[in-house]
Image (tube, rainbow, N blue to C red):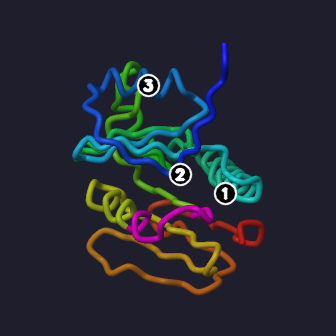
Amino acid sequence: MNNITVSLPPTLELNIDLTDEQFFQLCQNNRDLKFERTASGELIIIMPPTGSSTSDRNADLTYQLRAWSRQNKLGKSFDSSGGFKLPNGAERSPDASWVKMERWNALSEAEKERFAPLCPDFVVELMSPSDSLEKTRAKMREYIDNGARLGWLINRGQQQVEIYRSNREVEILQSPKTLSGEDVLPGFVLDLAEIW
């Protein structure tokens, strides 16, 4: 058998009509790719692996969130492979996220095994060099519109953090050393030293 090599852009958007079950199976059968789906059903294929530098920084981000979450047991933290079905129908996988324990426990075991049918309380998107700032901002607004209470868009290239909160203007910080989880993640402080 001959192999065929296909060059694809880092992100590919397709209009394919898939049921929720078909989308879930597509994700399960292609674990080397990251898939998301917009509220209108547009399939987004994000080609991993990310660069080693982005992966290293994302691991540190996830590690810090997980360590805080394990200490206080107020909720569940998730890495970039965790998918969520938002109230608007979009299926998204933030780079890191957290769900309050009461909301997580309200899900059935079957719902927990699939893309949890909720929007996380807290989301982070860590931009890689191939990410579009405009599309990432739209994704952050979508999280907030669907119930996220706090979101951070970390733009390493500009050394900026955009903080998204419900019913408030986006706050932009230039080169902060830390970020506070505020009242959503009480006591959580993200150290950005290893992420910049």
Question: Which residue bears the numbered disc 3?
Answer: 26
| Amino acid type, callout 1 | Leu
Near mark 2 (Cα within 10 A), the count class, few <14, some 14-19 or many ≥20, is few
Residue 105, percent across and down?
Answer: 40, 32
Is residue 134 in the magenta section?
Answer: yes
Front: mark 3 or 2: 2
Q: Distance between the residues labelled 2 and 1?
A: 26 Å
Q: In this view, does 196 lie to the left or right of 161?
A: right
Which residue is located at x 25 percent, y 31 percent? 17
* Label 2 SS: loop
Q: Nearer the viewer, mark 2 or mark 1?
A: 2
Q: Residue at x 67, y 55 (%)?
A: 58
Residue under label 2: 9
Mark before the other along the chain sequence, 3 or 2: 2
Vertical comparison of 65 with 159: above or below: above
Mark 1 sits on what residue? 61
The amino acid sitting under disc 3 is Leu
The spot of residue 118 in percent (x, y) is 33, 41
**Magenta part of the protein: which range?**
127-137
